[in-house]
Structure formats: structure tokens, C-alpha cells
Amino acid sequence: MARIDLSELTIARVHTAFHRGDYSAADLVQAYLRRIDQMNPRLNAILAINPNAVQEAQALDDAFRASRTLRPLHGVPVLVKDNISTSAMPTTYGSKVAASRPILPLDDAQVIKQLEGAGAIILGKTTLPDWATDFFSASTVSTWTQNPYDLARDPGGSSSGTAAGIAANLALVGVGTDTGGSIRLPSSFCSLVGMRPTVGLTSLDGVSPFVGCQDTVGPMCRTVTDAARLLDTLVLPTSPQSLAPSGGSYAAHLLPDCLPGPVCLGHLPQLGAEEAAVEALFTQVLTRLRGHASVTVRDLDIPSLSSTLAAASIMLSRGQHDLDDFLRTTVGTSLKTIYRNQAYPPTNFGIPGVATHASTLTDRSTASNARDALDRIITAHLGQAGVEVLVFLTTGRAAPRQEEITPEMGVTFPVHAMLASTLQWPAISVPIGFTATGLPVGLEILGRPLSDQRLLEVAFVIEQIVQGRRPPTVD
């Protein structure tokens, strides 16, 4: 059996190895399964393994030997968040309520069908907080997931296991979902590239909702290029041709020797750090970006940003409706029942917040008007400053210790990623380095709807300049 170095593998390197005959898809899957056996007891990132993974890889190897052609994700082992339905493995949504009910088997979610159609192998399902309702990993199914950079700290939520697993090289790429930062926050905590695509660009069929108009499925990877290649497959095949990326791929212009510049960034100082170590790193990174020939950074002051953002939030009102509707129709329970029975972790802030929220039509109308105002304000400042994207810290803090996490922390934690979610705009978090104590920090890049390709290009430029990721030493 081939000996494979799994550290920081990329799709391109794997496909090159397949062509050279260095190893097969089955070899790669078995290598990842051995690593999962070794590492997952310490990380608690993976809930279930696809029992057919090796067999599927062998079928792909047979097809490659016959045709000598590779599909876009041929033989790529993928971890997917466990709120995405799979027929080969149970879907628990992170909740013991769902895990205890005979609601399976489910059909594959649309994104699973697309991944497998592109040659990917769904390697396993990953942990998440109950119903994807928390910024941290605690779950009634899996308890806590550990951050591979510091096992005492949290990997973030709600795409917790995907973040920890991909950061620790338990698979090649991962898929998460994002409502209020659920891809980008854990990506920041785990030194990953995590993208929230434009709402509607990827399918939500077979994915549990939280806030339907903000929910989106996206890539979580170790490099921007792999995120772009994964997004190529995740995008709905029914998307209009006019929305197709130039060059036929989101990765078409991501070339290290020819950066897709120049890049003009609008920096939002208001979305800054709450920890000195994070602030020190971010200041260094901004200085490095300002000093690069292909990058311009302009500070933007938006006086009404915080108040308008708070007024525009619909997480509680829409979450109450959309999640409760899903629970009633799919699981046979209700949000109020889960809350009344305390069938959620004691540190979870989302379920009690959503279950007890009281809002009127007037409240929802006011929030909608505030969101429209926020859209106009941000759009106007982009135009006035002559910048194409905004940049800021994905979150103002590094990953907290799990012993410190409380429901109140979920309410007050500085998740700057909420700006993109509230606007319903696309955004991407990119690793920019580590604090003095070795904790990852992420930079968020926010753009207008359908600017996904340009966001990836800007992220690639920043990735190449900063080179902010390194693998954890949890081994």
C-alpha cells in the first residue's frame, strides 16, 4: 500500500499523483481513514464514516484506469457538516432529539449529489451544535469538539467538526453551512479558508434551515484555490449562464506567478479586535498589505454601522419561524418543545434566544427596512471610497477556552462575520497568522452579491502575500 504524506494536501497535488500513479483514490481514502482513527478520538470532529468510501474510491480508480480522465473532484475525500442529508450515513443535525427518531434514511442533499457527480467521495459527517444554532461546538449528540491548535479551546460553530477536521488534515476539503458566520468563524479559529457564497448560488435542498434567507452552503479548505475548485462543484447547475465564472472556473485566475490585481481594500476599523494579541497581529498584516505594490488599503468610517447592523438583524424572528417549521415537518417536534424540555446544551444561546423571542409584524418590518438601509449605506461607502471589497477581522477574539463558554458569551462574542450575513452578501475568511500564543486569526473579505469570483481573487492575493496558515501540531 502506498505511503502518503497527508499534510496540507491539495486537489491539484492529489490529481497529479493520480496521473503519475503514485497512489490511487482507494489508497488516499484508506490513508485518511487511518488518520481519522488516530486523531478523531482527540478532536471529536467526525460523527460518522461513510461505510462505502473505500468501495466508491475503487470504482473511481477503475474508471480512471479505463479512461485516463479525471472529473473535477475525482477521488477527493470530503467531510460534510451533519445538517446536510446523506443516504449512506445518519443525519443528526447535532441534536439527540433527531438522533433518537427514525427519520432516516434520507435522500442525499442536492450538494451531495453534485459532489459525487464530480467524483468526490463523502468521507464522513462532522459535528455541529444542536440545529446549527451556536457559535461554539457543544452538542447533545457529540458534546464538545476540540480545536486542533489548542485542545482546550473551541473550534467555533456551527461548522465545528468540518473546521477541526480539515485543519487537522483528516480529509482533503470540507463543506459547511453559514447563517450568521457558521463557516467563517470556525475557519478563523482553525486557520482555514471559509467562504459564504452569495445566497442562492448553492442549493439548500436537503439542508436543515436556520434563517432561510441567510442560509448558504460553502467550502472550508486549507487554500483559496481548493475553496474555488470546490465552489465550482457546489454551485447549482441551474444557475444562469450569465452568473458563470469567467474562464469557466472560480479558480481560473488564481495563479501564484500572476496575481489578479491590483486590489483596492476598504478597511473597517470599527470591526476591530477585543484582544491585544489579535490587534497586534492584525496591525502587522495591514501594514504588510499597505506596503505591497498591488494592494491599496483605505480606512472607511461608517458612523451608523453598529446601530444599523443591530437593528437589521432578523436572526431571532426568522430563525424562530424557519427552524420551527423544519422541526415540525421533518422531525415531528417543535422549537418550544425542545426549549421546554431543555433538549440542548446548557451553554447554547441560540435555542433559548430564538424560542423565547417575541416579535410583531412591525418589528419584522422595521428590521427589513434597517437591512435595506444597511445595504444602501455600505454600497454608498464602497462607491465613495472607490474600493471593491471591505476587509475586517472575522471576529475580534481568538478561540476561547471551552471552560469559559457560557450562553452570555454567545450573545456578546464579537462575530464581525454577522455583517455579511445580515446584508445577505458573500464573504470569505482567510488565515492571516497566529497570536503570540499560537492561536489562529482570520481576515474577512466582504463583497457585493455575485462578486464571488472577485472575492476569491482578492482572498488569493492576500493569501499569497500573508501566507498566514500553518498546520496544527496536534499530532
Image (tube, rainbow, N blue to C red):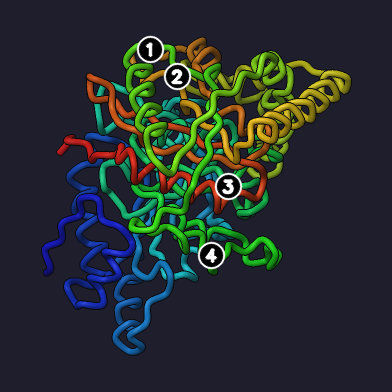
Q: CA distance from mark 2 to mark 1?
A: 7 Å
Q: Which residue is mark 1?
A: 275
User: Against 236, is 263 above or below?
Assistant: above
Q: Which residue is mark 2?
A: 396
Q: Residue at x 53, y 46 (%)?
A: 455
Percent x, y of residue 318: 73, 30
Is residue 82 something that shows in the picture? no
Q: Which residue is mark 4?
A: 113
Q: CA distance from mark 1 to mark 4?
A: 42 Å
The amino acid type, in three-letter code, at marker 2 is Gly
Along the viewing direction, whichever of 4 and 30 lies nearer the viewer = 4
Secondary structure beneath dot 1 equals: loop
Q: CA distance from mark 4 to mark 3?
A: 19 Å
The amino acid type, in three-letter code, at marker 4 is Lys
Q: CA distance from mark 2 to mark 3?
A: 22 Å
Secondary structure beneath dot 3 equals: loop
Other-residue count near label 1 (Cα within 10 Å), few / some / many at <14 / 14–19 / ≥20: few
Secondary structure beneath dot 4 equals: helix
Along the viewing direction, whichever of 108 and 175 lies nearer the viewer = 175
User: Against 255, is 438 above or below?
Assistant: above
